[in-house]
Amino acid sequence: LSYDGGEPVHALIGRQVALRADAPALVYGEESLSYAQLDARANRVAHHLLGLGVKPESRVGIAVERSVEMIVGILGILKAGGTYVPLDPAYPPDRLTYMIEDSGLSLLLTQSHVAPRLPVGQKVRALSLDTLDLGAQRSDDPCVVMHPQQLAYLIYTSGSTGRPKGVGIAHHALVRHAQESVRFFGLVPEDRMLQFSTLNFDGFIEQVFPPLVAGAAIVLRGPALWDSETFYRELIDKRISVADLTTAYWHLLAQDFAQEAARHGVRDYGALRQVHAGGEAMPPEGLKAWKEAGLAHVKLLNTYGPTEATVTASVLDCAPYLREGAQAPLRMPIGEPLAGRVLRVVGSDLGLVPRGVAGELCIGGELLARGYLGRAGLTAERFVAADEGERLYRTGDLVRWNSEGQ
């Protein structure tokens, strides 16, 4: 499938504002914001930021707890042409200090109860979204012109191999992935998608932009991670139809729901129709628990993708393994590439290896990150030129193609 990456993602969301102004866009606890209300609030933030000198590719940090302000702030930064930099307020101060300095922030959006905890130096101006007086700001779209190659966000990877690395993703990659996600999520305006990840994980991107592009509603969970009973209660109460979860959390839910079904019988799962698990290898025994819980009718996708390839790069529909009598494989495949990505399995010389032979997974296509901020050497090491000038990202993951082409 081919998507137009010419318009930024917030312009596609703007179309939904025009189509369904009064439809719910965000649900958070007892609070609900319509598309028109969300748009107006984000526009006021954008006009305020423009007044402070934000221009295309100005890096603006956002360090907020899970809240409506989190979505309003990010949309406001994008509408002003800025590049948003997500910062988890729960991170250790030295890690936050490094990310703030490395990204070159001069502005930071936060909340009044979070601000005192942030290691903001003299060079950074912090604005609390919950106390900011935006009454005098215009609520119309500022319509800042952006080039598709400009950065939409700069997200820091975990940095398990040392210092965190800032991965820069351009507008064209974000908007194309949002559109492709609408397709593989099967999102329609009637859907309600759970926003599960914290804002500094790239799963967040997939849980916010696609539902808003599709005219669906986002259900935000609060700061505390839900246990399985709270998840079930919220699933029914908020009529959640699509959930994108970490693999570990999905596995926990599957086990708890299977135990509940064994004790009291299979429950009704309300509107739930699709679940994605990603972030680490899917344990095959989770599929058995999923079936025992009475969830085989819910479409289950095993998703894979590094931050450097714009969130999810490949998906596997688990339906064949959820049929009656089906056996799960010893290792779960990660499926087939999504639009805009190419998967290559290569040897040490970056040459393709035959099917069935293990090699390093490299990802190509138009949705790769621009690279690592200020790390030219590392960018050159991980983003390499292959045959005919194709640019590939070396994941470091070992894979092989199976007989089904997965």
Image (spheres, helix red, strand yellow):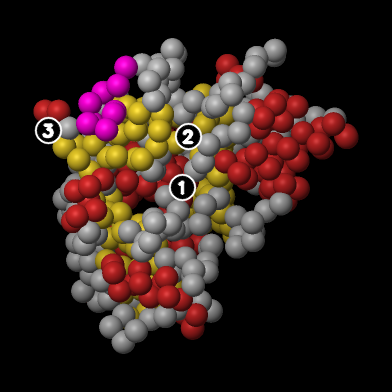
x%, y% of residue 159?
40, 58
- Region of the chain picked out in magenta, as a range: 346-354
Quadrant assignment, res 293: top right
- Which quadrant, please, contains the N terminus? top left
Q: CA distance from mark 2 to mark 1?
A: 11 Å
> Which residue bears the numbered disc 3?
389
| First along the sequence among labels 1 and 3 | 1
| First along the sequence among labels 3 and 2 | 2
x%, y% of residue 97?
38, 75
- For label 3, the SS is helix
Camera-side residue of 366 and 2: 366
- Which quadrant, please, contains the C terminus? top left
Q: CA distance from mark 1 to mark 3?
A: 30 Å
Circles 2 and 1: CB distance less than 8 Å? no
> Which residue bears the numbered disc 2?
303
Camera-side residue of 21 and 197: 197
